[in-house]
Amino acid sequence: MTSDKSTEKSLEYLDKILESLVAYATAYTLSFEELYKQVNNRDFKSDNKFNAMNHLISISDDKNFFDFVISDNQKALGEKLVEACYYLNKNGFIRISPNFDVKITFSGILKHSFGFVQDYQKEIESERRLHQVEEIQKNQNRWIIALTFLIAVGTLVSSYYYLILICNET
């Protein structure tokens, strides 16, 4: 079963693929069947409902391959893995051979060390901190405007007071 509604879960899926290629692969290379088994904890042979290479070719030619819905079935697990591999390949983290053997690149090894999820969480945390700083600045600006207004009013009152004193003395 797939669950594609959470951004973090999708990023965890990408991290899991890279983890499989680093931890369980010989020479950082796994066949699609081995990768499928590592990532989904299922046997590819029993779930073999589609041809991974044909699916990769069809999505690499289709400019809108993210527009279709992945349903919750065995075929979807394979399609999701192919699409995740296509994404990782497109971004230089893995290479896919004509036999659909998947090999992690040095960029992929580096990405694995800090992960997609950790990057996402840092980005979310940075956005949260930036929002807090903006709120603090807004509050400080309000106080500065209020104090400036009070100083201006005080200056006007004191000048009016001194003007009355000067006028009364003459």
Image: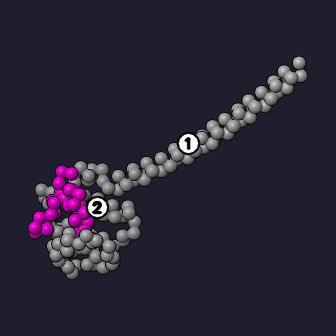
Q: Which mark is residue 14?
A: 2
Which residue is rendered at x = 13% and y = 68% of the image? Answer: 100
For numbered disc 1, what is the local secondary structure?
Answer: helix
Which residue is rendered at x = 18% and y = 51% of the image? Answer: 106
Amino acid at dot 2: Leu
Residue 37, horizontal then vertical, whole percent: 22, 69
Image quadrant in which you'd find residue 96: bottom left
Left or right of residue 156: residue 165: right
Which residue is rendered at x = 26% and y = 78% of the image? Answer: 75
Judged by depth in the image, the label closer to the viewer, 2 or 1, is 1
Q: Does the rendering let one see residue 74?
A: yes
Which residue is rendered at x = 32% and y = 56% of the image? Answer: 116
Residue position for label 1 = 137
Left or right of residue 117: residue 87: left
Residue 61, horizontal then vertical, whole percent: 20, 71
Residue 80, horizontal then vertical, whole percent: 27, 71
Q: Does the rendering let one see residue 70?
A: no
Q: How is the image coloured?
A: one colour
Residue that protrudes farthest toward the front in the picture: 170
Residue that protrudes farthest toward the top in the picture: 170
